Image (spheres, grey):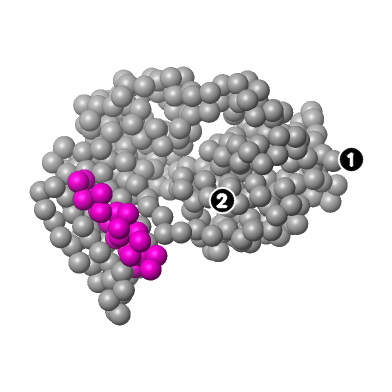
């Protein structure tokens, strides 16, 4: 008897997979199980909700019921999976169980919260559910501390500032976006944030948070502190791997998969923020879209390897948007930076003069596609 495909998770990766499966096979049984509502929303939009004054419920694009009907899928929302019996090929919740032929783990990643005293006072904005839980506090907050100056932290700092709030951004690195690019490349955005009024505390360590009569006091190294109304952790994501680990599947930073997106168990696959492909975590929309197309073919009997082209990553900071691609993290690149009023073009070249990475901003972003071609050459 065929049990079809069971998908755990309901985010962008899971939905892309369902849509690709249905393009190729209208009949295969698909079951989606998730801890949330399984309503569709755009996760990148969380970087803009405060300035747009958008409530969590207004983010919903398609209800779970409409999704189930459109794609002929069995949905089990608000369902926590307790166990995967990999030998019997059964997934179990507290009061139900599902047999599968092929299982896809699309469990995503959770926001990392730094282990400081008072960490329970930190909010996270990693899902519609998390936003719904704290939207009133964020709308009412006049003073906001954002912990982490990476991609999400920089986007949120700009958004909250555009909403008229007083924003402090803290990071222990010496520049923003430090894990993505060198300071000479990120400095244009850093200056723009400062010009907008963001208070940057770089090379600084958050040590504790405490509730006071005046809100929340954030204490830093060198006897400094700031009083705020809300604290948001934007210090990165941790792939959700507990279920995979309990099923005996190989886990490193994420769920380890091969080029066909198969895990160490031949009947279990992983997709999206939880998957580790070639030692890399790729929590961006384009690699997830391409991975979902490849995995759909393989779940239906194919054996195609995932081929990822050079891809753009977009920094959604509307007052100074950036696109980047290539190995921008490499420490041995020589950066050639041209800055004009209309924007910046930064090219990272190796010792042989080969283009290995680039970052473009504002009106110069139209040059990104030609640069992408040069990267791929």
State the image coordinates of residue 62 (x, y, percent, origin top left).
53, 23
As drawn, 49 above or below 345: above
Compare marks 2 and 1 and give the one earlier in the sequence.
1
Farthest-out residue, left: 341
264 sits left or right of 333 in the view: right
| Residue 105 marker | none
Asked whether residue 359 is drawn in magenta, I would say yes
Residue 33 picture quarter: top right
Q: Residue at x 63, y 20 (%)?
A: 65
Stretch in magenta: 356-377
User: Which type of secondary structure does the marked residue at label 2 adopt?
Assistant: helix
Q: Is residue 244 visible?
A: no
Q: Distance between the residues labelled 2 and 1?
A: 28 Å
Image quarter hosting the N terminus: top right
Q: Which of 309 and 279 is in front in this view?
A: 309
Residue indicated by mark 2: 291
> Pointer 2 and pointer 1: residues touching (CB < 8 Å)?
no
Residue 348 picture quarter: bottom left
Residue indicated by mark 1: 1
State the image coordinates of residue 246 (x, y, percent, origin top left).
72, 50
Image quarter hosting the C terminus: bottom left
143 sits left or right of 261 in the view: left
Q: Is residue 110 visible?
A: yes
């Amino acid at each position: 008897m065929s049990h079809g495909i069971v998908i755990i998770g309901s985010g962008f990766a899971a939905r892309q997979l369902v849509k690709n499966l249905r393009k190729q096979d209208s009949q295969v049984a698909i079951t989606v199980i998730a801890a949330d509502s399984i309503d569709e929303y755009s996760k990148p939009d969380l970087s803009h909700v405060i300035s747009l004054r958008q409530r969590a419920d207004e983010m919903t694009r398609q209800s779970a019921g409409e999704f189930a009907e459109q794609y002929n899928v069995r949905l089990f929302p608000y369902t926590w999976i307790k166990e995967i019996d990999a030998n019997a090929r059964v997934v179990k919740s507290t009061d139900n169980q599902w047999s599968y032929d092929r299982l896809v783990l699309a469990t995503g990643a959770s926001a990392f919260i730094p282990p400081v005293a008072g960490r329970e006072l930190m909010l996270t904005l990693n899902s519609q559910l998390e936003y719904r839980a704290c939207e009133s506090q964020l709308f009412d907050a006049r003073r906001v501390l954002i912990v982490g100056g990476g991609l999400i932290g920089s986007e949120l700092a700009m958004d909250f500032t555009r909403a008229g709030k007083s924003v402090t951004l803290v990071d222990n690195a010496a520049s923003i976006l430090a894990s993505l690019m060198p300071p000479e490349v990120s400095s244009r955005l850093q200056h723009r944030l400062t010009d907008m009024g963001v208070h940057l505390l770089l090379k600084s360590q958050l040590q504790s948070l405490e509730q006071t009569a005046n809100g929340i006091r954030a204490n830093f190294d060198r006897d400094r502190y700031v009083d705020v109304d809300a604290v948001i952790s934007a210090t990165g994501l941790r792939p959700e791997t507990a279920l995979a680990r309990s099923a005996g599947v190989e886990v490193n930073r994420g769920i380890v998969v091969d080029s066909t997106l198969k895990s160490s168990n031949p009947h279990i696959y992983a997709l999206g923020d939880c998957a580790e492909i070639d030692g890399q975590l790729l929590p961006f929309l384009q690699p997830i879209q391409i991975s979902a197309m490849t995995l759909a073919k393989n779940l239906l009997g194919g054996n195609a390897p995932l081929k990822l082209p050079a891809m753009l990553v977009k920094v959604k900071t509307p007052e100074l948007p950036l696109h980047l691609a290539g190995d921008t993290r490499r420490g041995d690149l020589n950066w050639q930076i041209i800055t004009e009023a209309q924007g910046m073009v930064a090219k990272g070249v190796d010792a042989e003069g080969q283009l290995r990475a680039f970052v473009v901003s504002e009106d110069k972003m139209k040059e990104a596609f030609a640069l992408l071609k040069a990267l791929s050459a």
